[in-house]
Image (spheres, rainbow, N blue to C red):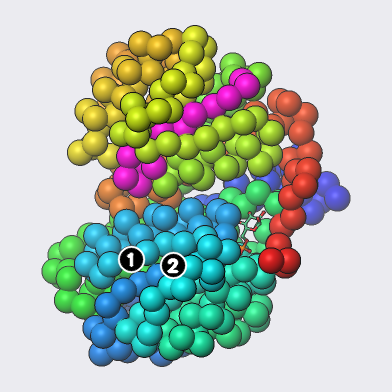
Amino acid sequence: TAAEKGGYEHFMAKEIMEQPKAVRDTISPRIKDGRIVLDNITLTADQLKTFRKIFIVACGSAYHVGMVAKYVLEKMTRIPVEVDVASEFRYREPIIDEKVLVLVISQSGETADTLAAMREAKRLGARTLSIVNVVGSSIANESDDVIYTWAGPEIAVATTKAYSTQLAVVYLLAIYMADLLGCLTAEEYAAYLTELQALPDKIEKILQNRENIQYLASQHFNAKDVFFIGRNLDYAMSLEGSLKLKEISYIHSDAYAAGELKHGTISLVEDGTLVIALATHQNLFDKMMSNVKEVKARGAVVLGMTTENNTQIEQVTDHVFYIPQTCDVMLPSLTVIPLQLFAYYVASMKGCDIDKPRNLAKSVTVE
Ligand code: G6P
């Protein structure tokens, strides 16, 4: 009903707008006196030091959170991380023993493949830690430890606030683990917490700017194919941006690591092809600009996204969307917001059934 949608036309819009609160609710209770406190976590510092590897298993958008988590956890803890879609992990005889931590990410806590992958990992002796939204769900109950995302109920099939809160938990966990492993100075620890706590307000700021995205969507909702490109964490974000767009607007889209373009994908770019170029990382900005020039030279129309200081992007792209600055690892929390909004507005302008896209289910309980 209209009341349940809080005055919005769709649950997805309501849930997009709830993200500052959802992220704040997920982070705030876990920070006490300048320290991350993960209540109920039984994993000890000594156990943590024994892990030779972390595997992440998940499906769909939760898998995309896993892609971000791989970059973040490796960078901050220096433990090697592998990330798999759950339905692949199970059937490839993963090399698992007691020296492995398996991180399971799931909004519902009931996705059949994810649950089965976790059970298989446990059987092989791994320690399991899950990031789940639904309290008391199977994955939450059966994992050795669980950290809940306090997103509240998510109704729209296309996930938004669950994704954002999963990312927030990944940051909490990465900082927590890096600290236990002695990888952070006190200053670095404090700086990460400051950035983490500033995310909800920055997300709010992007949401206030949503008419900009609505305008860009109005210019491009008739696109036949859309390509998302990015490097490093922006590649992980390209995957999520592309999934959001295709699942609710039915526009064909794909995500590519920008450096791979010249190995084949660029043959798909022709006059008028829409390319969404994510260039939020300062150290990769120039590399991204050369990729943008490559697709522009083949006739692409390019929407760029970068952080507020990088105005030189305007010289190479057709339109730009700016996000606030934060530390590199946390940029995904901001990058995802315009991507969600773009998918939403495009689907809305096409008149799609946004909250219940064809052929899709909120929770997939078949294998
Ligand atoms: C379905 C949903 C996706 C979700 C995926 C995993 O495909 O439509 O939005 O990312 O399942 O669901 P989970 O509940 O495990 O996060």
Decide which of 82, 187 is in the foreground and name it.
82
Crowdedness near tag 1: few (<14), some (14–19) or many (≥20) residues, C-alpha within 10 Å: many
Looking at the rendered structure, the secondary structure element under dot 1 is: strand
Residue 184 screen position, x and y as percent: 17, 69
Identify residue for label 2.
Answer: 56
Instruction: Work out whether residue 23 can be spotted.
Output: no
Query: Residue visible at 62% across and 52% down?
Result: 159
Of the 4 image quadrants, the one containing the C terminus is bottom right
- Is there CB contact under 8 Å for labels 2 and 1? yes
**Mark number for residue 81?**
1
Q: Which badge, 2 or 1, comes first in the chain's sequence? A: 2
- Residue 55 in the image: state x and y as whole percent: 40, 70
Whether 34 is drawn above or below 42: the answer is above
Q: Secondary structure at mark 2?
A: strand
Tell whether 102 sits left or right of 7: left
Q: Is residue 8 above or below residue 46?
A: above
**In the image, residue 105 above or below residue 357:** below
What span is in magenta? 223-235
Residue shown at 51%/17% (left/top)? 273
Q: Residue at x 31, y 74 (%)?
A: 53
The percent position of residue 81, horizontal first and vertical second, equals 33, 66
Q: Amino acid at mark 2?
A: Ile
Specify whether residue 40 is in view: yes
Q: Is residue 87 above or below residue 215?
A: below
Nearer to us in this view, 53 or 75: 53
Q: Is residue 65 left or right of residue 331?
A: right
The amino acid at mark 1 is Val
